[in-house]
Image (cartoon, rainbow, N blue to C red):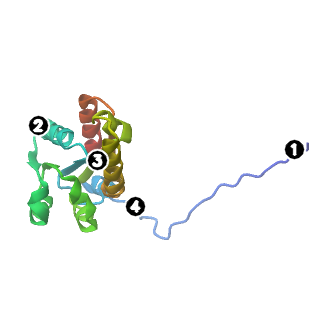
Amino acid sequence: MQKRETDMLDVEYEVADENKRSVYVPGMAKDMLIGGRDSGNVFIFCLNDELRKSIAAKVAEKLGRKFVIISRSDGNPVLNEVATGDNQIVSMPRGAVKSEKNRELLKSNGKVITIMSDFMTLLNASDGSDDAREQISLMLNRFEPNFMEASHHIVRSDQSEDEILQDVLDKIAI
């Protein structure tokens, strides 16, 4: 086998304006990361309603922010009102993620975090029957794609509640 020598080239870029530079203002990097305004809002989704409410309440307490629970019956007027507020930790009903308009509203007004449950975690929390298996499959297929599209961050639910809480707090700090 014959050895070949390869010439390495350095690439230089010339900028027409030598005074050109990037400028960042407070909150800009954060806004660029989350794609919305720096509202301090965090919208939390989870298939497990009790886990979602519990984590959202603990996050609100730790961060000293207002804790809001939106229920399925509240509808879009309440969702719109809450989304335009500031410094809230909001426990969201899973159905709110079904609408593209709602997903975009939430993403542009705060951080959206989903506590994602896998099939086995949900099955272990159920009676394990064939009916439970079918319901879990339907629920995952119905909501998971929308959770993925809406979320800035995903947190796994197969951890202890303290680990989930810490993971959520870490994601909020990003």
Q: Secondary structure at mark 4?
A: loop
Residue designated by label 1: 3
Residue designated by label 2: 61
Chain-order first, disc 4 or disc 1: 1
Structural distance between the alpha carbons of marks 4 and 1: 44 Å
Residue designated by label 3: 114
Nearest to the observer: residue 46 or residue 128:
128
Q: Residue at x 60, y 59 (%)?
A: 12
Disc 4 residue type (three-letter): Arg
Q: Residue at x 24, y 38 (%)?
A: 169
Q: Position of residue 36 (x, y in %)?
A: 26, 60
Structural distance between the alpha carbons of marks 3 and 2: 19 Å
Q: Secondary structure at mark 3?
A: strand
Q: In terms of image quadrants, where is residue 141?
A: bottom left
Q: Secondary structure at mark 1?
A: loop
Nearest to the eye among marks 3 and 1: give it.
3
Disc 3 residue type (three-letter): Thr
